[in-house]
Image (cartoon, rainbow, N blue to C red):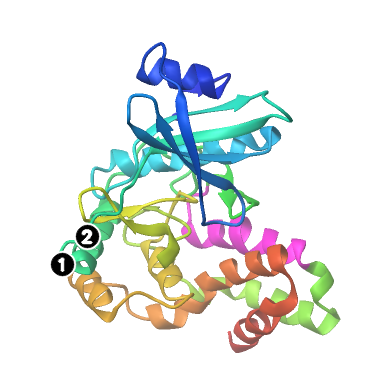
Amino acid sequence: MITPQHYTSLESAICSLFGEGTEVERTSRIAGGDINEAYGLTLTDGRCIFMKSNAKENLSFFTAEAVGLTAIARTKAIGTPHILGVGTDEEGAGYSFLLLEFISGKNRNRNYWEELARQLSDMHRASTAGLTSNGKYGFDCDNYIGMRRQINRGHDRWINFFRDCRLEPQFQDSDRYFDREDWKRIFRFLDRIDEILVEPEYPSLLHGDLWSGNVIEGNDGRAWLIDPAAYVGHAEADIAMTELFGGFPPIFYDAYKEAAPLQPGYEHRRDVYNLYHLLNHLNMFGRMYLPAVKRIVGRM
């Protein structure tokens, strides 16, 4: 596993990264996600960096995020913010932090969505050597999908991985929402998963949580990826996620399919991949996601 540089305080991180005597001159709160707090830190030398923070016991959130960003960056296919380091600070009640390159959000390039499609297809075709252990699918470490742990135990078959490490744990954790008849349908569905999903032509590094909020305009005007829940799987699981909450423009899908045609039947499998994310939202946010979950299970 690729581990990021760890610091024992924010002060020591700033000094190590930018030189003795450099301090945080101004801290600006940045609105955004609902799991971590985010800040822009302006330093005494005029530079600005980005910091996420959480309770100190949640350092693993940031270590896992840094590992995922590093894996994506190493494909050299698509932009990600440069990782400066992670750490914990005992100031006050204490906190954990992740330091990243600050993204200024330049104007989008003219062919932003088409470029994103081609870059993403390149990432999906990049070698996954060294990213998994004990199988072709999974990841070298567990990580997080939102605030919930994501199991990445290695498997040789994609379908088995998706059933065992994606759907089954989420169903188990949402047990209280289902009655006996629901569970009969769920078990029938899981037993038939081999008839619904297909093995990919090649394993792909996935972002893992690829909705529009995790794609931003980078410092080069092109699309960059943030907040990954990375693992090795079937590329169409990433594409399915892009369609779950609002979707990307049609020009993105046209360009992606031209660069990397999807296997026949993707439209039928799409809801099964998104069932994982709907179950995760059910477990994080409550029963507003239950009708969609039941509808997908009942259709398959």
Q: Residue at x 80, y 77 (%)?
A: 178
Q: Residues within 10 Å of mark 1 (few under 14, many from 20)?
A: few
Q: Is residue 3 above or below residue 206?
A: above
Nearest the eye: 291 or 288 = 288
Tag 2's secondary structure? loop
Asked if residue 158 lies left or right of residue 149, the reply is left
Q: Residue at x 34, y 58 (%)?
A: 216
Q: Which residues are magenta?
A: 155-174
Q: Residue at x 60, y 57 (%)?
A: 34
**Amino acid type for the residue under numbered disc 1:** Asn
C-alpha span from label 2 to label 1: 12 Å
**Amino acid type for the residue under numbered disc 2:** Asn
Tag 1's secondary structure? loop
Find residue 111 and name its label: 1
Tell which residue pokes out farthest to the top in this image. 20
Q: Residues within 10 Å of mark 2 (few under 14, many from 20)?
A: few
Residue 42: x, y in percent?
A: 41, 34
Asked if residue 229 lies left or right of residue 113, the reply is right
Q: Quadrant of residue 61?
A: top right
Q: Is residue 99 above or below residue 206?
A: above
Asked if residue 1 lies left or right of residue 165, the reply is left
Frontmost of labels 2 and 1 is 2
Q: Which residue is mark 2?
A: 107
Q: Residue at x 41, y 64 (%)?
A: 238
Q: Is residue 59 above or below residue 243?
A: above
Q: Quadrant of the C terminus?
A: bottom right
Residue 33: x, y in percent?
A: 55, 56
Residue 245: x, y in percent?
A: 48, 75
The number of discs equals: 2
| Residue 215 inside the magenta-drawn segment | no
Q: Quadrant of residue 212?
A: bottom left
Residue 275: x, y in percent?
A: 58, 73
